[in-house]
Image (cartoon, rainbow, N blue to C red):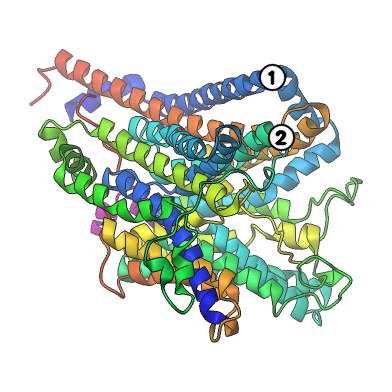
Amino acid sequence: MPLIDLGAAIALGLRYFTILYLTALGGLFSERSGIVNIGLEGLMIVGTVMGAWGTVEYGPVAGLLIGALSGLVFSMVHALATVTFHVDHIVSGVVINLVAVGLARFLSALFFGQATQSDPGIPHLGSIDIPLLDRLPLGLGAAFSNMSPVVPVAFFMAVPTIYILNRTRFGLRLRSAGENPEAAETLGVRVAPLRYAGVAISGALAGFAGAFLAIEINQLFREGQTQGLGFIALAALILGNWTPIKVMIGSLLFGIAQAIPLRLSDAPVISLLPEEFIRMVPYVVTIIAIAGFVGRVHPPAAAGRAYEGSAA
Amino acid sequence: MATAASGAPKRARSPRLEFVGGQILAFVGAALFAGFVGGVIIVLYGENPLFVYATVLNYATARPEDIAQVAENATPLIFSGLAVAVAFKAGMFNIGVEGQYIVGMLTAAIAALYLDWLPGALLVPAVVVASVLGAVMWAAIPAVLKVKTGAHEVVTTIMMNGIAISLVAWAILNPLKSTGDQSVDLRTNLFPGKALMPSIAEPLGLPSSVHLTLLFPVALLACLFVWFFLYRTRLGYEVRAVGSSSGSAEAGGVSIGAAQIKVFLISGALAGFVGLNHLIGDKGYLGNNYEVGLGFAGIAVAFLGRNHPAGIALSALLIGVLIRGEDGIALSTELPTEVLIILQGVLILSVVVAYELVRRAVARRQLKEEAAVEAAAPATEH
């Protein structure tokens, strides 16, 4: 029995990994371009309500895309405030999170007739089994069967991300905007549009992740369903040192940590630990990492700093 | 410099006036813009914005108990706004007010439940002290980590917030769980009556549904205290020096680390007051449905009020009006009350943007004036 639970826990953990990794990759693009984004939670919240509405109206594929698009649109508030008007990145991010809660309730009242949730059982994508892995013995196969097709896509997102950041003109310029905007501008790179692009990618990915949470995991929109996952994604981004592969490992770790209290609460050892203490793990690990007790983390040098630009 | 001397007589007092005038203009302009954006949403929803805004104002100011309600709403926001502002003046961002006040509520609840043998005159202060100590302890960890290891306080306090929520959830479900089985809510036992903050609503003849307590005047006193601290004490001066230019502060002999730790602990102490009105002014127990978000709202209040104590008090009252207005909207219109939360967000962002635009305009004018003076008086330049 506990082993079957283990398979189920990994399956759920992979779904949480998908949310965390996609959101953290979004944060990676934003922060590598120089814009700190603590509004990921709010962008995700907008994705949950818009994604749920989209899937009810037009089906799950459209729902996921609408979630991504609305996250993108909403993130432009953050870009406008920070890039164009030099509002402190943290202040703007906090406002994004504050407004998202109100906006989600407002939209939910509009779409579903009540501010706090949609009807349960909204349409979702069909599930897939991963060949071979789904036959793993000891109940582990359960981890790789009935999987949302988005989960494997999330794993492979590391490939285009690394390629874009390291091999394309856009990626190199984006990173230069986040590391040394003055030098970038001297070399003829326009910093502001790159930072807009970085924030837009973070909005789209966080909105997509929110829609995934509503459509593929909970099959409804419910107020507060993100439960701070945006902040845990931020933790994974920091723990992963703003690099795609390490962020993936962090997201995997934290995703499994999310699933353990939900699926393995009766397992040996874990049953002795209160659920709430397992929930603290991502935060504690990140504090330890950022304090430099295990290696060192290096944020992009110019992240959080306004760039006045040469046009003035 | 010669340019300064020739320019000075003409503009001896005006820059300061210009600065304040610009700020007021910026605020009014931003408020109008926010009202317009909110108005568009309201029209799209099929209601009349003027009627909605009049309803909000009416519900917040019509009767004495409405005004008292606004003051009640503003009480925690003043404390959290001050907590954010004090740290910000030292160049630090305390996004951890959220977690700090939540832990403060936990330690306050422990004091209220386990120090019940104290007489009333001592129990209330003991609960307040416990809340402050809990919050200060939660603030001390990121403060020390920042100074000792360079860990950025924004990241560590976000993480401390997450830990605080789980810690309190665990405490309410386990060691502090209510012993009576008549309650279906997840919460602690009721605090003894003598642990509750004295109300000032009842002596004023207001209905007991208004939870206006001594904490409101205490909040106003805290504004005075923070003003005095920042602008009239040595540490306050050092703090502002560190916040505006850490390099020159250090050259001036200020120990940056020590000043930052002290001010972060003061910020944490202020955060310790944020949850108290909810806890011992209203509920009388700690339940798992306690009020959240007051710490993040404090960031909004602080920036709306330009991180100045007087501005913070006014901003908190303004937000208090909007919170009170939600009831009016719910009763008199078909509009979801959340429109006011959206309005708050638009207001904060437009105010911050407006201040920035004024700063740029002033800087451009000064640059132009200096250039003009320099061009007009090249002979005085040596």
For the residues labelled 1 and 2, say whether their Cβ atoms are less than 8 Å apart.
no
Q: Which chain carries label 1?
A: B
Q: Is residue B236 visible?
A: no
Give the residue at x 85% y 40%: B65
Q: Is mark 1 on a helix, strand or loop?
A: helix
Residue sitting at x 62%, y 23%: B41
Q: Residues within 10 Å of mark 1 (few under 14, many from 20)?
A: some
Disc on res. B302: none
Give the left or right position of residue B296, taking residue B183 as reference. left
Q: The residue under label 2 is which amino acid type? A: Thr
Residue type, numbered disc 1: Pro
Residue B330's place in the image compared with B90, above or below, is: above
| Secondary-structure class at tag 2 | loop
Q: Where is residue A291 in the image (x, y as percent from the top left)?
A: 34, 70
**Chain under numbered label 2:** B
Of A108 and B80, nearer the camera is A108
Quarter where residue B54 is shown? top right
Residue at image location 39% in from the left, 65% down from the top: A252
The earlier-in-sequence mark between 1 and 2 is 1
The residue that mark 1 highlights is B49
* Rendered image quadrant of residue A137: bottom left
User: Does B286 lie within the magenta span?
Assistant: no
As rendered, which of A256 and B237 lies closer to the eye?
A256
Residue B117 at least partly seen: yes
**In the rendered structure, which segment of residues is drawn in magenta?**
B234-255
Q: Left or right: where does residue A54 sit relative to residue B189?
A: left
Q: How crowded is mark 2: few (under 14 residues within 10 Å), some or many (20 or more)?
A: many
Location of residue B376 in the rendering, given as x and y in whole percent from the top left corner: 17, 13
Residue at the spot 48% in from the left edge and 28% down from the top edge: B23
Circle 2 is placed at which residue position? B337
